[in-house]
Image (spheres, rainbow, N blue to C red):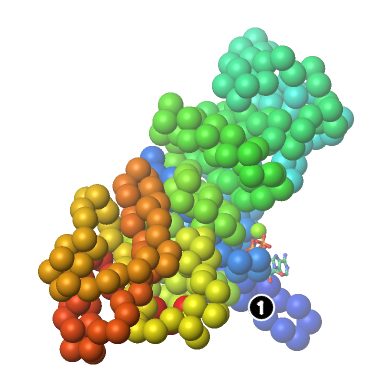
């Protein structure tokens, strides 16, 4: 559906060239909710804006449905943009227009008939839960309500792609969850291909099925959200994931604990098996759980444990680790 091929974006100042996006290639399939995560300045917005050519790539190409749109201008470009809706962190509503007129705006620009506009705006305001607010101005709305208007406006022309640039970053946790639920609900109903930018892995976990991790203009890792959470490979991804899973332990644990600490990740069906009781029985050891949780990512369980095995000889510990390695997704000595 959307193919980003070797895209770079350079910004030139007097005597300096800055590469905000550096040779990024991504394939986003029809109907996917694809996340792009990274810290501030990673180049996420710049990359996202190349998809509707708000930002022209310096190098590389953008394909939509196998059509290379990179050099589109005029009516060709307008037609492509018509198929792409976008929502923003700070909503970007027109303050002098009512909710009705904000939602109607893209349809009016593209020359829709008055009656069709009215019908669609009422339909959309119902979809986003704002039927009773259509005559309000943005200043009379909460942040979450403003984003609902932004979402309705983005959907006005029945786009086939929805670009979301940190749409929840200005919202509190509860409002964030309600906006994510709304976007999920819209996706369920429309199957619209959605590309979602955020700096939080937690948001990715809640809404996306695929994710690309960006750092300093480069995509360092991409894949299924579940796999990235279970087995992050790149150090930057590991850091993001461990932050989100909140696996930090107080330093004194590392200082005071005798024996070995193990991090154990077990996924899918295995999260429902009693692996630890198995080990305890089979090896006759005491295992102390220091940290433990089961996360549900795309409704599949992912078990994460940090355990301590005390006072055992190293050969026995090696045997236990080898046994656990066969039974789990990952078992490794944990150093924090
Ligand atoms: N028009 C521009 N001219 C010059 N530099 C720019 C321009 N737009 C972005 N940049 C630079 O490119 C880098 C990436 O910016 P971008 O907005 O894509 O990051 P981001 O990942 O979206 O960050 P954030 O999470 O803060 O929104 C930044 O260092 C930024 O200063
Ligand atoms: Mg940004």
Please name the residue shown 57% across and 21% down the image.
127
Q: Is residue 134 above or below residue 215?
A: above
Q: Is residue 97 visible?
A: no
- Kindly identify which residue carries mark 1: 18
Q: Quadrant of ligand 2?
A: bottom right
> As drawn, is 1 to the left or to the right of 35?
left
325, 259: nearer the viewer: 259
**Residue neighbourhood size for the residue with mark 1, other residues' Cα within 10 Å, grouped as few (<14), some (14–19), many (≥20):** few
SS at badge 1:
strand
Q: Quadrant of residue 9?
A: bottom right
Q: How many marks?
A: 1
Residue 293, position as x, y percentages in the image:
40, 56
Please name the residue shown 30% across and 84% down the image.
311
Please name the residue shown 21% across and 61% down the image.
277
Residue 235, position as x, y percentages in the image:
46, 77
Say if disc 1 is inside 8 Å of ligand 1: yes
Q: Is residue 14 above or below residue 165?
A: below
Residue 56, position as x, y percentages in the image:
60, 60
235, 218: nearer the viewer: 235
Q: Is residue 3 above or below residue 213?
A: above
Please name the residue shown 51% across and 72% down the image.
249
């Amino acid at each position: 559906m959307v193919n980003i091929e070797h895209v770079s974006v350079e910004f030139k100042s007097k005597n300096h060239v800055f590469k905000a996006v550096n040779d990024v290639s991504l394939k986003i399939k029809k109907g996917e909710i694809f996340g792009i995560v990274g810290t501030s300045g990673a180049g996420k917005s710049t990359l996202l804006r190349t998809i509707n050519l708000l930002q022209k790539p310096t190098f590389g190409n953008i394909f939509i449905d196998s059509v290379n749109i990179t050099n589109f201008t005029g009516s060709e470009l307008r037609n492509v943009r018509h198929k792409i809706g976008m929502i923003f962190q700070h909503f970007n509503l027109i303050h002098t227009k009512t909710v009705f007129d904000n939602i109607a705006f893209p349809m009016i620009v593209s020359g829709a008939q008055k009656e069709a506009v009215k019908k669609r705006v009422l339909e959309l305001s119902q979809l986003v839960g704002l039927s009773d607010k259509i005559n309000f101005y943005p200043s009379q709305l909460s942040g979450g309500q403003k984003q609902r208007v932004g979402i309705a406006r983005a959907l006005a022309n029945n786009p086939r792609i929805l670009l979301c640039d940190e749409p929840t970053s200005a919202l509190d946790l509860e409002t964030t969850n309600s906006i994510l639920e709304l976007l999920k609900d819209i996706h369920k109903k429309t199957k619209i291909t959605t590309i979602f930018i955020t700096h939080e892995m937690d948001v990715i976990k809640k809404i996306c099925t695929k994710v690309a991790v960006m750092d300093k203009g480069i995509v360092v890792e991409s894949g299924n959200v579940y796999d990235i959470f279970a087995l992050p490979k790149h150090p930057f991804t590991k850091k993001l994931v461990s932050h989100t899973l909140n696996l930090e332990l107080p330093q004194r644990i590392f200082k005071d604990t005798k024996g070995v600490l193990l991090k154990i990740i077990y996924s899918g069906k295995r999260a429902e098996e009693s692996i630890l009781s198995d080990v305890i029985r089979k090896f006759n050891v005491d295992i102390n759980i220091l940290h433990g949780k089961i996360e549900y990512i795309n409704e599949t369980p992912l078990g994460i444990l940090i355990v301590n095995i005390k006072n055992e000889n190293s050969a026995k510990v090696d045997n236990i680790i080898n046994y656990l390695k066969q039974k789990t997704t990952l078992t490794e000595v944990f150093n924090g």
